[in-house]
Amino acid sequence: MIVPGYRLLFWFTALVVPAVLVATALPATVSLVAFLVAGFFLVVIVDAARGFGVLGGLAAALPPVVRMSKDRPGEFVMELANPTGRARQLRVGLDLPSGLGVTEPEQIVSIPAGQPVSLLKWACRPLQRGRFAIERVHLEAASPLGFWAMRTTVASQCELRVYPNLLDDRRGMAAMFLHRGALGIHAQRQMGKGRDFEQLRDYIPGDGMDEISWKATARRAQPVTKVFQIERTQEVYVIVDASRLSAREQPRPAAALPDGVDARGLEPDLESVTTLERYLTAALMLGLAAEQQNDHFGLITFAEQVKTFLRARSGRAHFDACRDELYTLQPRQVTPDFEELASFIRLRLRRRALLVFLTSLDDPVLAESFVKSMDLLCRQHLILVNMLPPPGVEPLFTSPDVRSINDVYDRLGAHHRWHQLRELEKVLRRRGVQFALLDNERMSPQLVSQYLGVKQRQLL
C-alpha cells in the first residue's frame, strides 16, 4: 500500500497551490506554471516508483507463545530481519487486541547499515485474563525523497497467554512456600489406623478382630496383626462454578492494586473483579499448597454441565495443565446443574477424596438443588463448600454508617440473606459437609488453611 506522506502534502500546498493562483491571476505565466507543476508531479511519480522497493527483504517474527500474568508488567520481543543490510528507518505497528494494556502500539526504529537482525521490545500490563492473538505486523517506510509512505502487512502467529496473577497471594503465604518456621522439624512416618497397608506384627492383647490377618495367622499358626500406614498422598479436587452467579463483581483486593494506587483512582471497570476471577486465583493457590504437601491436585469446572475434568496428579507439568485450563475460563449466563455434577463425580471418583467447592449458594433454589446433590457424595468424599458472599451481605449492626431509613432497610435485607446462608450451613453440616463464607481480601489464605486443617486432623 502507498499513501501520501507529510512532505508531499507540504510541498503540494507550498508549491502547486500558489502556482495555480499565480497562473490564474497572470495568464502570461501559464506555460511556466504548467512546466513547474508537471516537473513536480514527475518527481513525485518517480519517487513513488522507487519507493516500492524500500520494504523489500524485510521480515518480522514474533514468538509463537508469550506467557504473562494479569496486572503485572510484561513484555514481548519482535525480531525484525534485514537481510540486505541497508540502513532503514521504519515505523512498526502491531494489530493488538484490547485488554493487553500496551502503552505504545507503534514504534519508530532506525536500523543501521550492516545489521541483519533487530529486536523490538513491547511493554505491556495486561488488564484481562485470557488468550490473545497477534495476527498482523504493519511496517511503514518512507520513499527515497519522502513524498510517499510505503506500507505492508506481515502475517504473524503469536499467542499471548495472560494467566491469573498469583504474586500477591503468594506473598501473603510466603512462610508456607518458603518453609519458614520449619527449621529443626524432621519428617517422620505416622503409624496408626489408616488405609495403606504397612506391615505385619505379632498379636498383642487388645488388638481388634478386624486387625487380624487371618491368612498370615493360618500360615504361622499364631495370631498376626496387620498395621496400616496413614495415607501420605491424598487426592484434592477443586470444583469451580463458572455459571451466572460467578459473573458478579467483587471489590478488587487492596493487595492486587499497583503500588501507590487507590481503587477509587482506577477506571470504573478496574475497580472490581468478577467472583470467578477470585475463585481461579484461590484454586491455583490451593494447587500449589497441595504440591507442597505431596498430595495430588485435580480440577473440575462446570456450569450447566461439566466443562473440565483433570484427574488428580502432581508435578509442575500437571499444575501448568490446570493453569492452562483455567486462564481462559469465563462465566456463562446459565444456571448451574448440581445434580449432573454430582453424578459425574460419583461415576469417576472411586477413591475417597477432598472436594473443595467454589460456588455461590445465596439463591434459595440453587441452594436446595445443591443440598440434594450432596446426598450422592457426602458419604464417600470429604466436602468443603466455600463461597464469597455478595457485597453488603453481613450481620446486622456490622456497619456503623447508617444515615437514613433506607439504610436501615438495606441492612435488614442484608442480614436476612446472611441468616439464610447460616441456615444453609446447618443443613449441610448435618450431612457432614462443611460450609464457609470467605473474606474477599483473604480468600486464598483461608482456603489453604482449611486444607491444612483437614491434613492435620487426618479427616481423610
Image: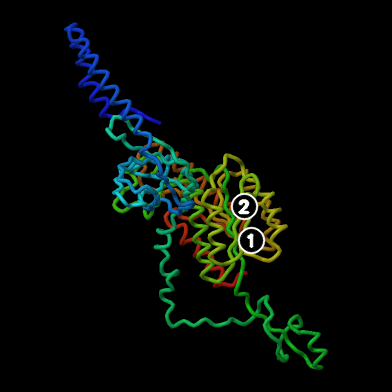
Position of residue 34 measured from the top left corner of the image (x, y, whole percent):
24, 14
Q: Residue at x 32, y 28 (%)?
A: 46
Front position in the image: 31 or 448: 31
> Relative to residue 82, is residue 147 depicted above or below?
above
Which part of the image, by quadrant, shows the N terminus?
A: top left
Amino acid type, label 1:
Arg
Residue 337 in percent (x, y) is at: 65, 46
Q: Is residue 94 left or right of residue 7?
A: right
Amino acid carrying label 2: it is Thr
| Spatial CA span between label 1 and label 2 | 10 Å
Q: Give SS at disc 1.
A: strand
Q: Which residue is mark 2?
A: 308
Left or right position of 401 against 37: right
Where does the image place residue 205, in percent across and percent down from the top left?
Answer: 72, 91
Question: What is the total number of numbered labels drawn onto the structure image?
Answer: 2
The quadrant of the picture occupied by the C terminus is: bottom right
Q: Is residue 220 left or right of residue 148?
A: right
Residue located at (46% from left, 43% from top):
134
SS at circle 2: strand
Q: Residues within 10 Å of mark 2 (few under 14, many from 20)?
A: some
Residue 129 marker: none
